[in-house]
Image (tube, rainbow, N blue to C red):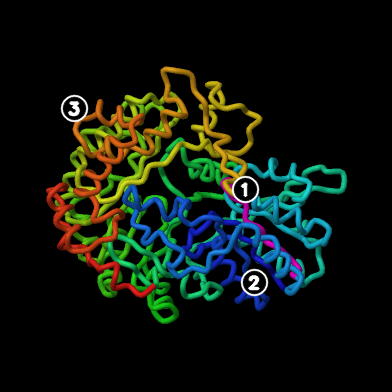
Amino acid sequence: MKILIAYPNLPLMMSPAIAVGLFNSICKSKKVEMKLFETTEYSNDVSENRHFNMQVAGANRGKQSSGIGYDIKPYKQILPDFLKIIKDYEPDLVFMHAQEDVYDQTCFLLESIKDKNIPTIVGGVLAISAPDFLLENPNINMVCAYEGEEVLKQAIDAFRANKSFKTIDGIYWKNKNGEVKRNKPCKLVNLNDITPDFDCYENRRWMRPMGGTVFSRALSMETYRGCPYQCTYCNSPGTRDLAKTFDLGNFMRRKSIDTIEREINYYIKEIDPDFCLFIDDSFLARPAKEIFDFCKMWSKYKIPFWFNTRIENCKPEYLSALKEAGVYRMTFGIESGNEKYRINYLDRKVTNKTYLEYFDYINKSNIPYSLNVIIGMPYETKELILDTARLCRTARGYDGLTISRFKPYIGTKLRTIAIQSGFLKDEIKLVSGGLLRFDKKTSEGLISMPKPYAQNDELEWLSKAFPLYAYYDDNLYPTIDAAQYDDELYSALLKDYKKVFFHGEYQLGGKDKKKHINNYCSKHDIAQTYKWTEISAVNF
């Protein structure tokens, strides 16, 4: 049997996908062939790509240059390359990824093979959140309605038994009359049973600039699937609710510490990682004993690592243990700095007083960290967004800041609020229909609110100027406001900001930047924890 994993992806999101590693491992254990086609390394203009330009807001994405070492291809090459692998490989089954931002790619690829009669199962986040929507597509006949590991195993078994793929558990499918049939769900996966295998990726895909260092073998690991929190802008609560609906038990599962250690020993042998990214929704949302057991285990390896978690989970004793284990940096989602808005609309029941208390712990730990915020959410005004900037300023110790425009993803409660409030038309199915339109940009799907709520042109400016609002005191806000209509003033403000907050035009690291950060984020003595590499010394 020959399986093709087709993975439409946001351009230049280079970290190997955990799902692909899991599917590769399953195919090997089942002794079937597998090939991977993905769209990651296709982009018409690297200079316009957000994953490289995020560094302007402090996300450390490295050089903004086609010489970074990736062989970037234009969008127009996606279809010829896909059709070539279909022709040469002749797969018996295509597993197609569907994620809302790149759904256009999924549709584009499916349309190109509609006459080839290749069985195709479409899965991913969008398939879980909106299986019926996907089945409205004439080129989609089978959808993996939940987790994909067991579906793939059963698909392989069905092929070998000469049975239809439509007989397997875990899928929704259409009959010849277009009627949707819903098979019973698969059981939840035991995360301890499968170790992702990434040998289908080239070595260059492991390179990742972060925090002033370019790591050459940056490994992604999953230790936790699910999230205990109820954030309304996230689809994790909906995924967890589905497990209850299907009577599958608790969707939130964690790997044992023994499993994590077994996996890192395997990767040390196969990849020799010099960095690890834990992609869990909230890494510290686990029992205290488990955190300390992990730190004790990881201390034997001292591989630098990053994770995302919530501010209020960062107890001083956790931070001390994590630092001893080799933590390199952390990321926190603030999303909104206005306490009432955050509690009422985002279901994040944490006070600003608690945030400031824990920011003090975090800053004293000397562990570098970055912040994520979302702007343009339902009922947000400019003043509410400036409250977020003020909270970032009060935190002071961050060295990276990512600003995202709100997108009403299917399956999130905040999307429902946007629709019920009249800020989004219900018939708009996707946030944008996909970011890849090959020849144009789009802002379709972004919500539109009446005044006094933030307007789209206002949000464009706030996205651009947010680091300035988050850095300078309120008495300079009128000057920053004026810079929206004065390019020279904006350039002068940005130049001053970069001079003190960044080293050079981008956040590239180096000894001078350590001094800047220490001066302007005075509580954060990053010299103790950062391993700085001069960017010019890196051989791309």
The C terminus lies in quadrant: bottom left
Please tell me which residue lies in front, 356 or 103: 103
Residue 82, how many percent across, how many down?
Answer: 69, 64
N-term-proximal mark, 1 vs 2: 2
Asked if the residue at tag 1 contacts the one at tag 3, i.e. Cβ–Cβ closer than 8 Å, the answer is no
Which amino acid type is marked by label 3?
Asn
Please tell me how crowded label 1 is: few (under 14), some (14-19), or many (20+) other residues with Cα within 10 Å: few
Residue 105, how many percent across, how many down?
Answer: 64, 52
Q: Residue at x 21, y 36 (%)?
A: 472
Please tell me how crowded label 2 is: few (under 14), some (14-19), or many (20+) other residues with Cα within 10 Å: some
Q: For residue 410, say whether it is visible.
A: no
- Give residue 463's mark: none
Q: CA distance from mark 3 to mark 2?
A: 58 Å
Front of the two marks 3 and 2: 3
Going by the image, does 519 lie left or right of 418? left
Which amino acid type is marked by label 1?
Asp
The N terminus lies in quadrant: bottom right
Q: CA distance from mark 1 to mark 2?
A: 29 Å
- Give residue 35's mark: 2
Question: Which quadrant holds residue 37?
Answer: bottom right
Q: Which residues are the magenta region?
A: 91-102
Q: Which SS class for mark 1?
A: loop
Q: Is residue 217 above or below residue 228?
A: below
Which amino acid type is marked by label 2?
Lys
Look at mark 1 in the image and give the residue it sits on: 439
Q: CA distance from mark 3 to mark 1?
A: 42 Å
Look at mark 3 in the image and give the residue it sits on: 475
